[in-house]
Amino acid sequence: MEAKIWARVLAAIEPGVSRPNFATWLKQTELVEHGHGVAVVAVPNLYAKNWIEKHIAGEICQYLSAEGEAITQINLIIRPRADQRPLDELPLLQNNPSDPEPAAETSHLFNPRYTFETFIVGNNNRLAFAASQVVAEKPGEAYNPLFLYGGVGLGKTHLMQAIGNDIQKSSPKKKIIYTSCEIFTSEFIQSLQEKTIDKFKKKYRSVDVFLIDDIQFLVNKEGTQEEFFHTFNILHQANRQIVVTSDRTPKEITKLEDRLTSRLGWGMVADIQPPNLETRTAILQAKAKEKGVEIKPEVMDYVASAITSNVRELEGSLTKLITTAEIEHALITQPFAQKVLKELLSHSLSSGKTSAKSVIKAVANYYNVETSDLLGKNRVKELVYPRHIAMYLLKTKLNYSYPQVGQALGGRDHTTVMHAVNKIIKELKQNSGLEADLAAIQQGLK
Ligand code: ADP
Ligand code: MG
């Protein structure tokens, strides 16, 4: 009886709220009872309670009243659904004195700049931001997984790392892993080769917070998908927080196994859209302030209206303006900005104007490493792989010679470059995810 009424009420409400909001806040609610003017509704958590109270309680009264008796008051009680309660018999793991793994081993991987404080909120990213904060505040309790999606350079990695930074600060003992899909994959494959798969499993299955970036690259990696699936299940059952980013929704990641697609949509799915002019201006202002540079409002306006595609580019333009002004001892006026950015705006890999530097920077951005590290000597795989990608792009897209590529990447031998380029060509044949990576990197250059 109550279930049927509630289904009708929800059906009436649904068209008026966004899909993620509905899925997150309303879908898991139940009408417990109603009568004498009062309805009791069970919701899964405090956040749902607050949201419903704030946004939709009036409407609920209205639709419930339409079912018969007038309802003027809603009491929301928090009651997680049975299928979401934690399981007791879990094999986990940390705080176990016999566990030799050091805690928080990956903590240094967070970029200290990527915090909630430095993230500018606009209509384009409000839901994603709010959801990330909730997750940081109550990891594993509110939405699990949190799935953030949006185009290149719109702040997915920033938000994800902000979650990591925040949790690390408030709960330093929590074991947090931030990894990209790429690194997860290569570690998995390496562990198979080196027969250390148990160690690999243990590492990922024992975390409190699992942040995995750019999940779209799981496509066509069946073995890794399988492993990720099991990791996901174990962590999810233990109420460990999982956060995933992607450039598209779970459903749009084609060729992902159905069971994985459905799990990725279990919690909150929040999008990040490109920022509008107002938000772009606010971001520029914040970044200029961060850099301690004062920039005239008309210049801000010009840059914010000229650079529309993504925040990374916006940031890049500002940096370019500031450094060019420094080098040329020029004032940052609007004509100056126009001149400097004209070049930037016409950049594209095929136009012949792209510099090696910007390609290397795009690769570094994409893989979340420092440009200086790509040019440096360190040969850990997290650097070697992007380095090879950069070499490949310089050779094939900018038509650099092997020695030129070697020069551009910190003075490497041309045979090293040849070897790297061939390796990538070979990998491209086997791994179609890589093609998507390359496309995304080039997108980042535009
Ligand atoms: P994505 O992972 O979506 O490709 P990133 O998180 O790497 O994008 O963001 C690219 C750059 O833009 C980063 O330097 C990030 O700090 C910045 N950025 C993106 N969105 C915002 C925002 N809303 N406020 C401040 N900085 C932002
Ligand atoms: Mg990213």
Image (spheres, rainbow, N blue to C red):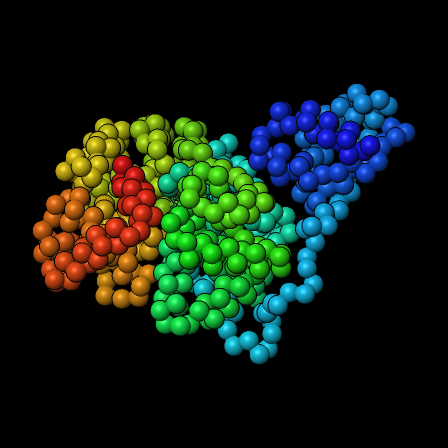
Q: Quadrant of residue 309?
A: top left
Looking at the picture, how far across and down is residue 446, in whole percent? 27, 36
Along the horizontal axis of the image, is 67 left or right of 395?
A: right
Along the horizontal axis of the image, is 122 left or right of 73?
A: left
Looking at the picture, how far across and down is residue 17, in whole percent? 61, 28
Q: Is residue 115 above or below residue 205?
A: above
Looking at the picture, how far across and down is residue 117, in whole percent? 50, 46
Looking at the picture, how far across and down is residue 210, in whole percent? 51, 57
Q: Work out which quarter of the rendered image holds the N terminus and state it.
A: top right
Residue for point 73% across, 27% down: 9
Q: Is residue 157 visible?
A: no
Q: Is residue 207 above or below residue 29?
A: below
Q: Is residue 197 above or below residue 208?
A: below
Along the horizontal axis of the image, is 49 left or right of 23?
A: right
Report the front residue among 248 and 310: 248
Residue for point 43% across, 49% down: 215
Along the horizontal axis of the image, is 240 left or right of 279?
A: right
Residue for point 9% across, 56% down: 403
